[in-house]
Image (cartoon, rainbow, N blue to C red):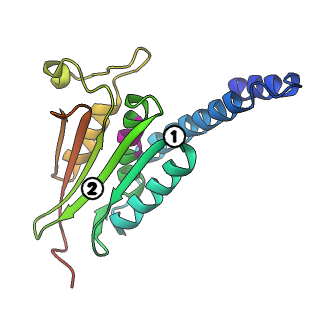
Amino acid sequence: ALAAANVDLIKLQDTEGRYVKHCALIQRELSKINDLVRDFIQSAREDEKDEPFDISEMLYELAGEYRDSYESIDFILEPFDEVVYFVGQKRKIRMLFTNLLNNSVEAVAYHGRIEILAEITDESIKIYISDDGVGLGDTTALDKSFFTTKTNGTGMGLPYCRNTVAQYGGKFNLQNRPEGGCRATVELPNSFGLQD
C-alpha cells in the first residue's frame, strides 16, 4: 500500500509527464506481486479442492495477459490442438505458470522472446516455457532448497514449482538451452487420456 501511494505521489508531482511509463511499469509489477502473494496464501488453504479445468484455456489467458503487459517481448504460444482437462487446484497451477513466466520476463530483461509449447500424450501433459534470456548460470546450484539468479530474489519460486508439480505426481525440469536462455519443462499426468 505504501509503495502504491508513493507511485501516486510521483504521478501527481510529474506535471511534465516524464515518469508516466515508469509509474505504469511499477504499478504493473506491484499488481503482480499482490496477485502472487494472494495466490500463495489462497493456495495454502486446506479447503481448496481439486477440480477439472482446461489447461489449454489457462495458457491462452496467461499468454494474452503477458502480451498486453509486455509489448516489447515476443510471446509465442503453440497450445494443445484440443481442450485438455487436468484435475487439480486451478489457482495453484496458474501460480506455477505465472512464476515461470515472470522468471522468463526478467531473464530477457523485458526485451526478447518467450515461447510456450504444449504437447499431450495418453500418459502426460507437457508444457515447455523457453526464453532467450541470460540462462541459469551455475546449474549445479539448482538442487539447493532455495535457488535464484536474481540480485533481490528469494529463491522460493523454484521450490514452489517443484513441490506443486510433485504434488500431482509430475516432473519438473529447468535447464539452459544450447542456443542460449532457459527452458522449464512441466510434465503432469494425463488423467483423462487423449480426448476425441
Outermost left residue = 123
Under tag 2, what secondary structure?
A: strand
Vertical placement of residue 152 versus 99, above or below: above
Q: For residue 67: magenta?
A: no
| Numbered range of the magenta stretch | 98-102
Q: Which residue is mark 2?
A: 117
The residue lying toward the viewer, choosing from 8 and 107, is: 107
Under tag 1, what secondary structure?
A: loop
| Horizontal side, residue 149 vs residue 28: left or right | left
Vertical placement of residue 115 versus 54, above or below: above
Q: Position of residue 55 (x, y in %)?
A: 34, 63
Report, in whole angstroms, how far the alpha carbon at label 1 lies from the one at label 2: 20 Å
| Horizontal side, residue 146 vs residue 190: left or right | right
Q: Which three-letter amino acid code belongs to the residue tagged 2? A: Leu
- Image quarter where the N terminus lies is top right
Q: Earlier in the sequence, mark 1 or mark 2?
A: 1
Q: Which residue is mark 1?
A: 72
Q: Which three-letter amino acid code belongs to the residue tagged 1? A: Ser
Dominant SS of magenta comes to: helix
